[in-house]
Amino acid sequence: MLYVGALVLLPVASLLRGALGGGLRAFAEVLARPDVLSALVMTAKLTAFAVVVNGTLGTALAFVLVRDRFVGKRLMNALVDVPFALSPVAVGVVLLSLFGKGGLLRPITDALGVEVAFAWPAMAMATAFVTLPFVVREVGPVLEEMGTDQELAAYTLGASPFVTFVRVTLPGIRWGLAYGATLTMARAIGEFGAVLLVSGGVAGQTETATVFVYRALEDRDDRGAYVVATVLALASIGLLLLLDVVRKKRGSRAEAEG
Amino acid sequence: MGIVARDLVKRFPGGSGRAVDAVSFEIGAGELVALLGPSGGGKTTVLRILAGLESPDEGRVLLRGVDMTDVRVQERNIGFVFQSYALFRHMTVRENVGFGLEIRGKTRAEVDSVVSELLALVRLAELGERYPHELSGGQRQRVALARALAPGPSVLLLDEPFGALDAKVRLELREWLRRLHEERAITTVFVTHDQEEALSVADRVIVMNRGKVEQIGTPEEIYDRPATAFVAGFVGSINELEGEVRGGRAALGSLAVHAPPGAGDGTSVRAFVRPHDVELVGVTSRVEKRSSVEVATARVERLVRIGWMVRIELKLEDDQPLTVELTKDRVAELGLAEGEEVFVNLRDAKLFVQDYSI
Amino acid sequence: MAAGTYLLLMVALPVATLAREGLSKGLAELGRALFHPVARAAVLLTLETALVMAAVNAVMGTLIAYVLVRYRFPGRKLLDVLIDLPFAIPTLVTGMMIVTLLGPHAALGQLFEAAGLRVVYAPPAIILSLLFVTLPLVVRTVQPVLMELDGADEEAAYTLGASEWTTFRRVTLPAITPAIVSGALQSFARALGEFGSVVVVAGNIPRRTLTAAVHVFGEVESGDVHAASAMSLVLVTISFCVVLVVSARQRGGHG
C-alpha cells in the first residue's frame, strides 16, 4: 500500500501542484498559447493515425495469426512483439537511417518530393510502430476464444461473408478491439523517444505534446512544461479509467459464457 | 426426395485416408433421420457436407431434387443447429432468431411476427430480451432451433443436438423434437452417438462407422436385423461370444445356436446376444437339467441392482462373460445369489462369420 | 496479405536497417563505437540500474500481487487500477514528476540531500523512474497465476501442519516463481531501452549518469548516426534475447 502510494500517488500529486500553482487562470492562459495548442493538436493527430492504422491492420494481422496456417507463422508471431522490445530511441535511429540525410530510402522520397524525416510522416510512422502490438495482442485471444461457429451459423442462415463480418464477427471482438485501441491511444499520447529523434522540433509545427514538454524544460519554461505535462497525465488517467470500464465489460461477458 | 447423397468422399487433410468413404443415401421429404455412429465415424462431416459447410472431394448432394453440390451454404436454404449452439453472444434471443429474416430484407413487422410465433413454439416467449449467457443449456438449444427454423428452411440439420445437456433435459427435448417434426413435417437429419436417442426419435437410422455406411433402416430393422457385426455390437448388445461352427450348429463354448446360413464346419463366428435374450432357467441345485443341448451352466459373479432391474454378470464354463437383465421380482423368484451355479439358454443371437481380413 | 506486408515493413525492415547501419563500417568500427569509454560506461550504468530495478520489482511486485489477490480491504479496487497508471502516463511526465518531488528545490529532495543522499541527477533517480515505469509488469504477470491457485493448495498445507511462512515458501512461491522471473525479465528488457523518464531525471553526465538510450540520443544530436546505430543494435540485441527467453519459457508452459 505504502509502496504503491509513494511510487505512484506522490509523484502525481506533486505534478498537479506544480501545474496549478499559479491558479486556474494562469493554467488556461498557457493552454491558449499557439505553440502549446499546436503541440496538443499534433499529438491528437498522430494518436488518431495510430489508432486507425493499427485498429484496421492490427485486426487483420490478428485474423491472419489466429485463423490461417502457413509456413513462418511462428516467426511472424514473434515479430509482432518486436516493438515492445525495441527502445524508442532505437526506433528513431532506424527512421533516421532510412529517411535522414544519406538515408537508405532518401533517394526515393526525394524523387517523390516528400519530406519524411523531421516532418509528420516520420513521426506518424514512429507512433504507429511503437503501438503496433496492442490491437493484435488484444484481438487475437478474443478471436481464438470465439471460434468460427457463430460465423458458420450466420452463413447457414443466409448471411454473406461481408454481412457476417459486420453483424457477427465485429460485434464479437468489439471489446477486445476497444481495449487494444485504448492502449494504443495511451501509448501514442505518451510516445516521446522515437518522436523526439525524428521530429524537426520546430515549435508550432512539428512538435508533439511530449516533445514540447521536453523543450520547455530545456528552455526553463517551467510553467508551460507543467501545464502540458498535466494535460497529458490527466488524459492518461482518463484513458486508464476507460480501460477499467472496458475490461469489466469484456470480463463479465467472458465469465458469463463460462 | 428430400435429400440425396451420392457417393460422397471426403479425404482427411494431408491426403491419407478418408473421413467419408463412398457414402450414399436417400431421405424422403418430411422424414426424420438419425445419423448414428461412434465419434470420429464421419457422421458430422456428412452433415456438414449436406449443409455446404464443407465440400466433398467426390460425389453429389441433391436437396429437393436439385443438385446443390456447388451451391454456397448461404443459398442452400437449410437450417443448421450447431453442437455448441453458436448463438450470437452480443444479440438478444429475439435478435438471434430474427437474424436470418432480417438479412433477407424482411420488414420489421414480418420479422417480429415470425420471431414471436417461433418463440411461442419453443416456449421461450418471455425470454426474448435475454442474452444467450443468461439462459440454461436447454433454453439455448431451443433458441438455436428457433433461429434455424426462422427463415423457413427446406431441410433441418442438427449436429449432436442434445449432447451437452443433462439426462432429464435431454429426454424432454427429444420428445419435443419428435412433436415439432410431426407439426412442421420438415425434412430433418440429426447426428448422434447415442443409439437410444437414434432409435427412439428417428423414423429411420443411418449407422456409420469409419466413414462408411453400415446399415440404413427403421429402428426396428436396425435393432432386430443388424446387417453387420458392427451394428449388432453398437446397437443394443452387451454380450459378445466367440465360437465356431460344428455339425451345422454354432458352438459358443458350452452354448450352441443355429449356424448362420452357408457357414461350413470350422468357420469362426461371433455372436451378439442382447441381455434380455438370455434365458436364465434356474439355479442348478433346484432345477433338473433338461435334456436340451442348448442349456449350459454358468456361475453368478455379481448382482447389480439398478432401480427395478437387476444386472446379473455370469461366467460361462469356458470363462466367457455373459450379462443378463431381469426384474428384481424374477431374481427373488429364482432365488439367485452371487456364487451360485445356474442353467442358461439363449433365446436369440445375432451371428456373424469372423472376418479375418480386419 | 496486406497484414503480412504491413508487419514486414513495420518490424522486419527496421531491425534489418539497424543491423546494416550498425555494421556498415565493419566489426572493428562497431567495437570502437562500443568500447569508447563514454559508451562503455553508459552500457554498464544501464545494465546496473536495470538489474537493481528488476530485483526490487520482483520482490515488491510479488508482494503487491499477493496483497491484491489474497486480501480484501477498502480501496483494493482503486489500488488495482492504480497499478496500470505507469503504463498510461507518458514516461517523460514520469520523469518530471520525480524531479518535482525529489529535485533540489523540493522539500523531500532537500531532506534527502541533508541526509547526504543525492537522488535526482544520480543513479537512485534512474532506478526510481525505472521502477515506476515497469511497476505493472511483475504485478500483472504474477496476479493471474496467484488467482488460479485459489488458496486450496495453501489450505492443504495448513491442514498438514505447515506454518504460514513455511506454506508461502514451500507451496506458494514455487508455483509463482516462473511468473515472477518472466515479469522481472520483461521489466529488465523494458528498462534497457527506457528513455523518456531517464533523460529528465538522470542529469546525463557522461561516464556518471548517462544511460545507453540517452547516449544514443546524444550521438544523434551530434550527428553521429553510426555510433547511435551501433549502440541501438546492442540494446536491441539484449532486449530481444530477453524477450525470446521469456516467450520460450511461456511456450514451454512454465508460466
Image: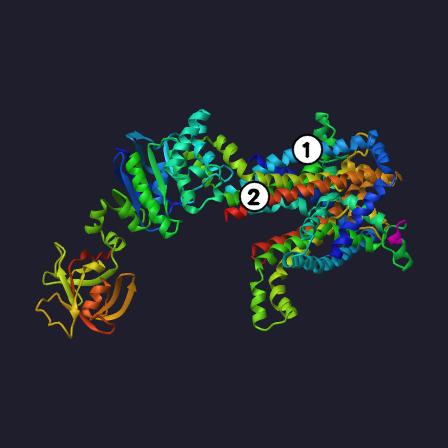
In the rendered image, the residue lying farthest to the left is B291
Q: What stretch is highlighted in magenta?
A: C105-109
Q: What element carries label 1?
A: helix
Q: Nearest the camera: B126 or A90?
A: B126
Which residue carries the number 2 mark? A140
Image location of residue B36, percent across then percent down: 30, 47
Q: Nearest the camera: C30 or B75?
A: B75
In the rendered image, the residue lying farthest to the front is B126
Does the magenta-highlighted stretch encompass residue C75? no
Residue B42 shows in this picture: no
Query: Label 2 is found on which chain of the structure?
Result: A
Query: Label 1 is found on which chain of the structure?
Result: A
Which quadrant does the C terminus of chain B fall into?
bottom left
Q: How is the image coloured?
A: rainbow
Which residue carries the number 1 mark? A48
Q: How crowded is mark 1: few (under 14 residues within 10 Å), some or many (20 or more)?
A: some
Image location of residue B219, percent across then percent down: 23, 47
Q: Inspect the image, locate mark 1, and give the three-letter code of the amino acid beneath it.
A: Ala
Residues at discs 2 and 1 in contact (Cβ within 8 Å): no
Instruction: Left or right? Give the position of C136 relative to B296.
Output: right
Secondary structure character of the magenta stretch overall: helix
Q: Which residue is drawn at 10% across and 72% down?
A: B288
Image location of residue C110, percent across then percent down: 90, 54
